[in-house]
Image (cartoon, grey):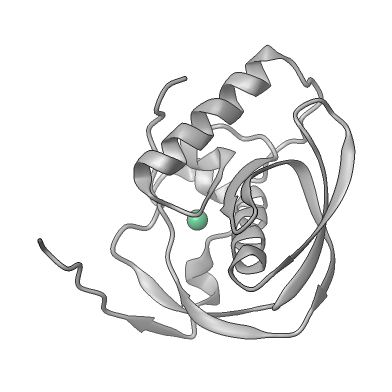
């Protein structure tokens, strides 16, 4: 496993559409392991492959149920609404209010290519929507209705 470099919003890779994963091989597993390690090191809640420079439909989320790997994810159902402050590892120091669905159902494949569906709510749902947007080359910044200043506590 290795920590990969997280690219920031100036990088064109974050504004491009990702290709589906077709091979569920060692290279994919290595990417998934590296993404999980990179996410934990950055203390984030979610990471999409374009954030480490890879234009493939791969997402990892540190959810309330533990680590979730989503390959070729599609949000098939959304309901409710939530508005809360959101940030992104690729947009350091930028925070703002985004309205997202409160519940969603995601259809995806696991690292072996097997399909599954997952119901997510609250922060897990927000995170999945944010990460799936990355796969479409979309950043949360364009959904922010009010930016906020957050000063990190120094200790
Ligand atoms: Zn993000």
Q: Is residue 53 visible?
A: no
As drawn, the residue found furthest toward the top would be 26
User: x and y percent of residue 150 in the render?
Assistant: 26, 75
Q: Which residue shows up at 36% across the image and 39% down it?
A: 41
Q: Nearer the viewer, residue 20 or 154?
A: 154
As drawn, the residue found furthest toward the front would be 65
As drawn, the residue found furthest toward the left would be 155
Rendered view: 49 above or below 124: above
User: x and y percent of residue 148 in the render?
Assistant: 33, 81
**Quadrant where the image shows the C terminus:** bottom left
Count up the numbered dots: 0
User: x and y percent of residue 29 in the render?
Assistant: 65, 22
Q: Nearer the viewer, residue 43 or 15?
A: 43
Q: Is residue 18 visible?
A: yes
User: x and y percent of residue 1 in the render?
Assistant: 47, 19
Q: Nearer the viewer, residue 138 or 132?
A: 132
Q: Which residue shows up at 49% across the image and 42% down it?
A: 51
Q: Which residue shows up at 53% across the image and 61% down it?
A: 139
Q: Which residue shows up at 67% across the image and 35% down it?
A: 56
**Image position of 145 (left or right of 130):** left
Quadrant of residue 37 in the image?
Answer: top left
Quadrant of residue 91 in the image?
Answer: bottom left
Rendered view: 112 above or below 122: above
**Image position of 139 (left or right of 118):** left
Rendered view: 150 above or below 45: below
Rendered view: 26 above or below 109: above
């Amino acid at each position: 496993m290795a920590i990969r470099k997280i690219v920031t919003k100036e990088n064109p890779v974050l504004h491009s559409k990702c290709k589906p994963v077709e091979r569920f091989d060692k290279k994919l597993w290595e990417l998934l392991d590296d993404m999980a390690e990179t996410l934990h090191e950055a203390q984030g809640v979610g990471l999409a492959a374009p954030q480490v420079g890879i234009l493939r439909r791969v997402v990892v989320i540190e959810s309330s149920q533990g680590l979730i790997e989503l390959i070729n994810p599609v949000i098939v159902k959304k309901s409710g609404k939530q508005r809360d402050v959101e940030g992104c590892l690729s947009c350091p120091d930028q925070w703002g209010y985004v309205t997202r669905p409160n519940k969603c159902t995601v259809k995806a494949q696991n690292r072996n290519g097997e399909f599954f569906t997952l119901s997510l709510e609250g922060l897990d749902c927000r995170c999945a929507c944010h990460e799936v947007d990355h796969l479409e080359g979309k950043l949360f910044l364009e959904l922010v209705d009010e930016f906020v200043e957050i000063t990190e506590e120094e200790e």
